[in-house]
Image (cartoon, rainbow, N blue to C red):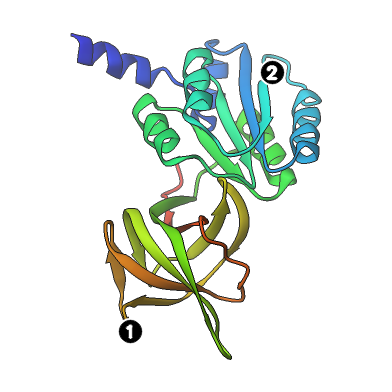
Amino acid sequence: QKQRSLEIAKAKKLTLDELYVKIKEGQIKELNIIIKGDVQGSVEAIKDAFENITHPEVKVKVIHTSVGGITESDVMLATASNAIIIGFNVRPEAKASQTAEKEGVDIRLYNVIYEAIEDVKKALEGLLEPTLKEKVLGRAEVRQLFPVSRLGTIAGCYVTDGLISRGCDGIRVLRDNIVVYEGKLSTLRRFKDDVKEVQSGYECGIMVENFNDIKIGDTLENYIIEKIAAKL
């Protein structure tokens, strides 16, 4: 019975994908939004833009804003208030991602302010069609730095969760859960051997293409982009 109650609670959480349907069913009168960003100026710009969106049936309400990565407490606030979370140039902490998945909280991540605004507008009008979805493969913590002449800096890393894959679509450099660079993985090594992937619990050497400003303590997050079939 308890498990059933948890499933029902999770099912009721709002996502942008189903917003329009719930508006038409009369279930939604307010769209609650939590905004997290890398700097205060970006957060304020997004907040102002959201609050200027008008809709005949739904009020867009920003219930919380702050600078920094998305935390578990942000997810719990979203759970309690049936809000969606908008992140600009930030990432969720690992625990926050796990809790969001468990609770059914919709976290949307952007690096262009305009796209965040457009997605919310499209969701309100029933025009948002998810076609691409990002899947994080894993994260690694930078523990040492090895400058290599004519190549750049190889980061000596420890894979903390998931895996690091040479076949990933992209890799991010995170500093305190704020995105400082996003690009391609150019080198992945175990000791001196080039490898296809490195699993959680193992050390490896990673080089990020065209980026040498990696620091000890940074987190490297690699991901793939999955194609989602358009909904009819």
Q: Say which element carries label 1.
A: loop
Give me the disc on residue 192. 1
Residue in the image at 68% along x and 14% along y: 57
Q: Where is residue 52 in the image (x, y as percent from the top left)?
A: 81, 25
Above or below, comparing residue 196 to residue 158 in the picture: below
Report the residue that reaches farthest toward the bottom: 150
Q: Which mark is residue 61?
A: 2
Visible in this render: residue 223? no
Q: In which quarter of the image is the N terminus?
A: top left
Residue 124, x across and y down, in percent: 64, 27
Tell me the residue at 47%/40% (across/down): 93
Mark positioned earlier in the residue sequence (1 or 2): 2
Image position of 183 (left or right of 79): right
Q: Residues within 10 Å of mark 2 (few under 14, many from 20)?
A: some
Quadrant containing the C terminus in the rendered view: top left
Q: Name the residue at the left extreme.
A: 1
Residue 40 against residue 6 in the figure, above or below: below
Q: Residue 146 carries which label?
A: none
Could one spot residue 102 in this view of the protein? yes
Left or right? Give the position of 45 relative to 139.
Answer: right
Which of label 1 and label 2 is nearer to you? 1
Q: Position of residue 137 (x, y in %)?
A: 37, 55
Q: Which of 121 and 140 is in front in this view?
A: 140
- The amino acid type, in three-letter code, at marker 1 is Lys
Image height of 198 relative to 180, above or below: below
Characterize the local packing of mark 1: few (<14), some (14-19) or many (20 or more) Cα atoms within 10 angstroms.
Answer: few
At x 66%, y 50%, the residue is 111
Q: In this view, does 112 lie to the left or right of 190?
A: right
Residue at 73% x, 16% y is: 56
Q: Give x and y (percent) for residue 229.
A: 41, 49
Amino acid tagged 2: Lys
